[in-house]
Amino acid sequence: MRVESLYGVAAAAAIAGCAAVAAAAAALTPPAVAIADRYLTLTAILVGATAVTAAATAKQRLDRPQRLATVVILLVAAGSWYAARLSVHEKQFDYLVASQQRQLELAAVELAGDIEIFVRERAVAAPPPPSPATWDRDVAAILAFDDDTSRRFAQRFGPRVRRTRELFALEGITDRDLDAFYRAPANAFQIGVVATRLATLPHRLERASR
């Protein structure tokens, strides 16, 4: 085989081999980055070694165009390796971003559901509405119950709510009603607003990411 022909075969092998490995690795879920890096590197090394070996073992001394062709094939091998590796890593980055978004969406839905359950449980234990005969005492009981509800909410859900809200804010998703109450809701009604608005955030994030 002529040296020129061998160069053509090596160039085609570099491009085809790297493309095949990159496509196979990127098609997996999650993308097989470690496997792609390993086999892309091996492919590039083998192609480069083929070109160098062909040049070193040629029966006649290579002329200037042939030496240039050797350099070109080495550059093609390196460029194909880099482009294919970059493609797989970009696919992995996209996968990680999408995975983190799905986890955030699920966490928000779960948190909203837990808060809704909490609100219903507190409603069952709530004192009755005030009656005219015992108005002051009943109002005091309701206010004390609201304070206790707010305190329990802060203990059980405060850090999770703040963290979830901040993570959505980093994605550019905020809610005016949520921001009004999430730090320190004063009663069950405001806590219910927090749960309702939290439940809307995943849908907004999903639409924004399309």
Image: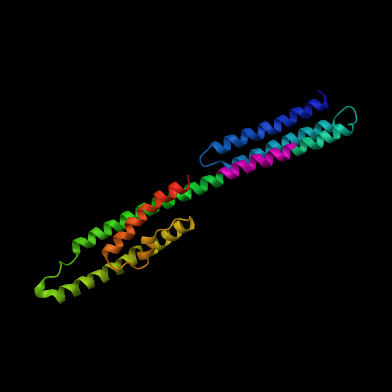
Q: Main secondary structure of the magenta part?
A: helix
The answer to whether residue 37 shows anywhere in this view is no
Name which residue lies at 43% across and 52% down. Answer: 104
The x and y percentages for residue 42 are: 68, 38
Task: Point out the residue furthest to the bottom here.
Answer: 136
Task: Point out the residue furthest to the top here.
Answer: 1
Does 135 sit above or below residue 1? below
Name which residue lies at 86% across and 32% down. Answer: 65
| Residue 26 in which image quadrant | top right
The residue nearer to you, when weighing 110 against 208, is 208
Q: What stretch is highlighted in magenta?
A: 76-91
Identify the image quadrant of the N terminus.
Answer: top right
The x and y percentages for residue 48 are: 76, 36
The answer to whether residue 86 shows anywhere in this view is yes
* Left/right of residue 98 with respect to residue 137 in the rendered view: right
The residue nearer to you, when weighing 156 against 102, is 102
Does 5 sit above or below residue 82? above
Does 117 sit above or below residue 187? above
| Residue 22 in which image quadrant | top right
Is residue 119 magenta-colored? no
The x and y percentages for residue 116 are: 28, 56
Task: Point out the residue furthest to the left here.
Answer: 133
